[in-house]
Amino acid sequence: DTEVTQTPKHLVMGMTNKKSLKCEQHMGHRAMYWYKQKAKKPPELMFVYSYEKLSINESVPSRFSPECPNSSLLNLHLHALQPEDSALYLCASSQDSSGGDTGELFFGEGSRLTVL
Amino acid sequence: KNQVEQSPQSLIILEGKNCTLQCNYTVSPFSNLRWYKQDTGRGPVSLTIMTFSENTKSNGRYTATLDADTKQSSLHITASQLSDSASYICVVSTGGANNLFFGTGTRLTVIP
């Protein structure tokens, strides 16, 4: 099984809503990532979890709150978002986040978020 | 400054034809270079990963080349198919999966 599964595929929310994006992998990877991708732009790194601990937070606003309940799961909690937060949110995993391997990244299908 | 530049920005070709996409980078130190294919609204899928010592790597009809001296890479697609229509993203790593520099991609459209 080489899949990274993201749910939901599509999410529409208002600016006052609280919602969550979920990501799951069963490849035994110890690093998981959230990326944000706007149309016709490359993915931008938001958060990195390594061995279930947050290792990188790329100055992401606090209205995005990541959570890693265990090594297979990664959540992104959303609260009080703005319309400009509408984007494709990609989860990814890799064997390790350090330089010890080629760091091949496996992406999920993404969650398309629309904030009204 | 670490940068990855891709050309062309977009490309339209006839089904069955070949094409080559270019990637120039200034990333240092260099660890590896990846090419990803991304269908619209979907997650990127890895095509190849090349380290410093690898000049050429193939994955079916996709062949990537790397010239680490000139800091250039190319992705050659042979006998294109309609399903090749996607964005192709070049990504350079300084080490590990959390040190990646993304190019802005080449949007390829294959028409019948």
Image (cartoon, coloured by chain):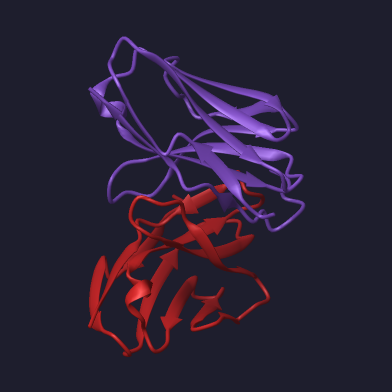
Question: Where is A12 relative to B73, above or below?
Answer: above
**Across the whole image, how many numbered discs are drawn on residues?**
0
Viewer-closest of A14 and B47? A14
Percent across and percent down for residue A36 are: 41, 37
Residue A101 occupies quadrant: bottom right
Percent across and percent down for residue B56 are: 59, 82
Chain A color in figure: purple
Question: Where is B30 relative to A82, above or below?
Answer: below
Viewer-closest of A105 and B39? B39
Image point (24%, 68%), residue name: B10
Image point (56%, 73%), residue name: B68
Question: Where is B90 relative to A21, above or below?
Answer: below
Q: Quadrant of the C terminus of chain B?
A: bottom left
Percent across and percent down for residue B62 are: 49, 80
Residue A72 occupies quadrant: top right
Question: Where is A101 relative to A47, above or below?
Answer: below
Image point (35%, 50%), residue name: B41
Viewer-closest of A16 and B59? A16
Q: Is residue B66 left or right of residue A39?
A: right
Image point (59%, 46%), residue name: A4
Residue A82 occupies quadrant: top left
Chain B color in figure: red
